[in-house]
Image: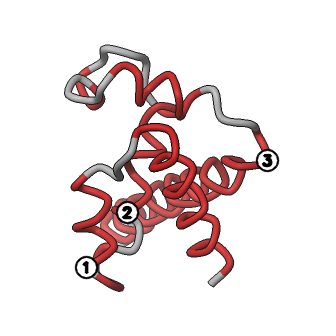
Amino acid sequence: MTKNKQHLLLCDIFKERFGYVPAGIILAQAGGIFLAFQKDMYFIFPFAFKKGSFPVRNMNPEHYDFIKNLPKEEVSWLKIKFTLFLTMIVLFFTTIITSYLFL
């Protein structure tokens, strides 16, 4: 629940600066539990990828710079969430690979 409040606060800050929230975020918010991680991806991508790289090629450069320059206390939870997500994926694939190796 706290993460949702932090997400909404981040959306409010974005809306205050640019006057709107990107459509992808609004659609992901409406998706409920099925898109729970997806709603944060727009904010996570600038921390995970270089400006101009393939995953952020369609992102407005002003949005990229704005998100990238937000204070650490406002985005630290995003970095933690993304790190845990990557760890989960690595462990998932490690489990699959090791289960096939030891059959």
How far apart are labels 2 and 1 at the CA level?
9 Å
Q: Residue at x 29, y 49 (%)?
A: 22
Q: Are marks 2 and 1 in contact (CB under 8 Å)?
A: yes
Q: Residue at x 74, y 37 (%)?
A: 71
Tell me the residue that label 2 is attached to: 39
Residue 96 position in % (x across, y down): 35, 67
Q: Residue at x 30, y 26 (%)?
A: 60
Residue type, label 3: Glu
Residue closer to the observer: 59 or 20: 20
Residue 25 position in % (x across, y down): 32, 59
Residue 1 position in % (x across, y down): 62, 84
Residue type, label 2: Lys
Q: Residue at x 42, y 63 (%)?
A: 98
How far apart are labels 2 and 3 at the CA level?
19 Å
Q: Are marks 2 and 3 in contact (CB under 8 Å)?
A: no
Number of residues whose C-alpha sits closer than 10 Å to that of mark 1, classed few (under 14), some (14–19) or many (20 or more): few
Q: Which of the numbered marks, if any, corresponds to residue 73?
A: 3
| Secondary element at tag 1 | loop
Q: Earlier in the sequence, mark 2 or mark 3?
A: 2
Residue type, label 1: Gly
- View extreme (top): residue: 52
Number of residues whose C-alpha sits closer than 10 Å to that of mark 2, classed few (under 14), some (14–19) or many (20 or more): many
Tell me the residue that label 1 is attached to: 31
Residue 88 position in % (x across, y down): 51, 63
Q: Is residue 99 left or right of residue 27?
A: right
Q: Earlier in the sequence, mark 3 or mark 1?
A: 1
How far apart are labels 3 and 1 at the CA level?
27 Å
